[in-house]
Image (cartoon, grey):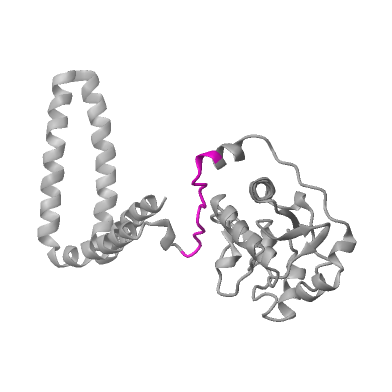
């Protein structure tokens, strides 16, 4: 796509410079187009009347005429060509040189799944969300201390992006079967109004305002662990801290971005950064 835009710019810029620098050539352009139309009509008629030899003669004469006209044009307008050609070529070449998608301001990483086995699992059976903990589990003193305003959070898996929810469910499955950690969804989709509400609560909660978080696009989730039927969120718990490290490794192996690597760490957070979704 970038190459196409560069070529389109090249053509438009060349035409614009030619017309601006050489106003007299506008009439020449009109005459040339008319002459070309007449020439094509005469050529078609000639093919019908004189046959292939006359048509071949006409074809042989055209390239020479074009080359001669081009050389005459360059000789007459040396200064204009010296200015116009670099003006067209330099931006085009720069666009091609910087054609890496990561250079674009709205680019978001593709997050391709590196593990072949994981990719096969994602393409196979559709995983079903586990039963959510009872509402009372989100109102304990520990939860209120660590994650205020969690009671009103959405834990509806259906509001999340299907690709992201399947990766997250696969992470839950791996954490339980391979590491013995049962996980629970604390919050998935987050409305713009709720995002602003959390941002107003302070930077210790979030620095992102409405539409600056992947939660608004159903591509982020906050998770924690269940132990003996109770939510364990605190990072001061060694068992939970070990779980967060394992969860980060699993999430990243599934192509997710883990909040534990951020400057303001969010160990239970993961997101799927799909290209072109969030405009920054």
In percent of width and height, residue 277 lies at 59, 57
Q: Quadrant of residue 225?
A: bottom right
In percent of width and height, residue 186 lies at 76, 61
Question: For this view, does 275 lie left or right of residue 149?
Answer: left
Which SS does the magenta portion mostly show?
Answer: loop
Question: For this view, does 209 lie left or right of residue 69?
Answer: right
Q: Considering depth in this image, is 54 or 75 the residue closer to the camera?
A: 75
Question: For this view, does 64 lie left or right of residue 129?
Answer: left
Q: Quadrant of residue 26?
A: bottom left
Q: Quadrant of the C terminus?
A: bottom right
Residue at the spot 42% in from the left edge and 57% down from the top edge: 101
Q: Considering depth in this image, is 225 or 4 the residue closer to the camera?
A: 225
Q: Range of the magenta residues?
A: 105-117
Q: Vertical placement of 255 versus 95: above or below?
A: above
Instruction: Tell me, yes or no, whether the highlighted magenta stretch contains residue 116.
Output: yes
Q: Is residue 264 visible?
A: yes
Q: Vertical placement of 177 versus 105: above or below?
A: above
In percent of width and height, residue 219 lies at 65, 56
In percent of width and height, residue 224 lies at 72, 61
Instruction: Tell me, yes or no, whether the highlighted magenta stretch contains residue 188.
Output: no
Residue at the spot 54% in from the left edge and 39% down from the top edge: 117
Q: Is residue 149 visible?
A: no
Q: Residue furthest front?
A: 238
């Amino acid at each position: 796509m970038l190459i196409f835009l560069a070529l389109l710019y090249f053509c438009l810029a060349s035409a614009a410079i030619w017309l601006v620098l050489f106003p007299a050539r506008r009439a020449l352009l009109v005459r040339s187009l008319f002459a070309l139309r007449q020439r094509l009509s005469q050529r078609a008629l000639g093919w019908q009347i004189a046959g292939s030899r006359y048509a071949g003669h006409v074809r042989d004469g055209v390239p020479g005429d074009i080359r001669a006209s081009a050389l005459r044009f360059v000789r007459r307008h040396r200064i204009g060509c010296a200015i116009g050609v670099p003006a067209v070529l330099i931006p085009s070449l720069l666009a091609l040189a910087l054609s890496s998608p990561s250079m674009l301001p709205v680019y978001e990483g593709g997050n391709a799944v590196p593990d072949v086995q994981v990719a096969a699992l994602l393409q196979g059976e559709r995983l079903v969300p586990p039963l959510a903990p009872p509402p009372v589990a989100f109102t304990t003193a520990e939860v209120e201390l660590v994650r205020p305003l969690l009671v009103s959070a959405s834990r509806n898996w259906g509001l999340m992006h299907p690709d992201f929810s399947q990766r997250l469910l696969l992470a839950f499955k791996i954490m339980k079967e391979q590491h013995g950690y049962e996980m629970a969804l604390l919050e998935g989709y987050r409305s713009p109004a709720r995002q602003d509400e959390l941002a107003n609560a302070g930077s210790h909660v979030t620095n992102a305002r409405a539409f600056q978080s992947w939660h608004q696009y159903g591509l982020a989730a906050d998770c924690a662990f269940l132990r003996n039927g109770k939510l364990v969120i605190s990072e001061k718990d060694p068992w939970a801290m070990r779980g967060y490290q394992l969860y980060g490794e699993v999430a990243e192996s599934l192509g997710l971005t883990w909040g534990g690597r951020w400057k303001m760490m969010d160990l239970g957070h993961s997101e799927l950064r799909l290209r072109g979704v969030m405009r920054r």
